[in-house]
Amino acid sequence: MRSILRSSPVLVTILALAACISSAAPNGALNGTWDTPTNPAGSGIEVQIRSSGASVTGTGKTYAIQHVVKASYTIKGTYENAVIDWSMSYDAGGSGRFHGHLVGSNTIQGTWTPPAPDTAYSVTLLRQ
């Protein structure tokens, strides 16, 4: 092993850099307002989230037709290796879940699971 390390300074550099890399997300990577693409009927999802390392917190609203607030909730979860996983505690009671991925720097795609009796559905959120 010693002879390999002595003969390959590039390998030593690569190993040193690899040891420094963390799987935790950079602070603030998800900070901002995210919502579903424009819908002429006015329904959709809007969340304001903050991330610090692997922690994600925030608030959100789901809108019915004509941009009427259908539900409000708080968000707590994690973000690591581009994977986003959060739970939602609804103000009116009940809980939901979101599981998705950051795609580029301004798009999140995943599955939104609202409280029962509603069912899960695919969603795209865009950073505003």
Image (tube, rainbow, N blue to C red):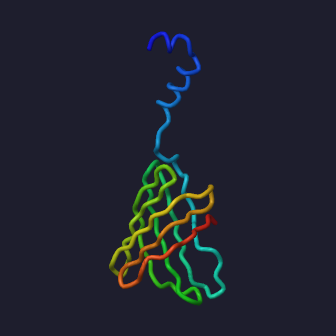
Residue 41, compared with residue 58, is above or below; it is below
18 sits to left or right of 37:
left
Residue 50, compared with residue 21, is above or below; it is below
Residue 78 spot, x, y in % from top left: 42, 56
Residue 60 spot, x, y in % from top left: 48, 72
Residue 94, picture quadrant: bottom left
- Residue depicted at 56% across the width and 79% down the height: 44
Q: How many marks?
A: 0
The outermost residue toward the left is: 93
88 sits to left or right of 13:
left
Residue nearest the viewer, comparing 86 with 19: 19
For the N terminus, the image quarter is top left
Residue 108 spot, x, y in % from top left: 56, 63
- Residue depicted at 50% across the width and 36% down the height: 21
Residue 114, compared with residue 126, is above or below; it is below
- Residue depicted at 47% across the width and 59% down the height: 84
Residue 5 spot, x, y in % from top left: 50, 14
Residue nearest the viewer, comparing 81 with 75: 81
- Residue depicted at 40% across the width and 69% down the height: 97
Residue nearest the viewer, comparing 96 with 5: 5
Residue 45, compared with residue 7, is above or below; it is below
For the C terminus, the image quarter is bottom right
Residue 123, picture quadrant: bottom right
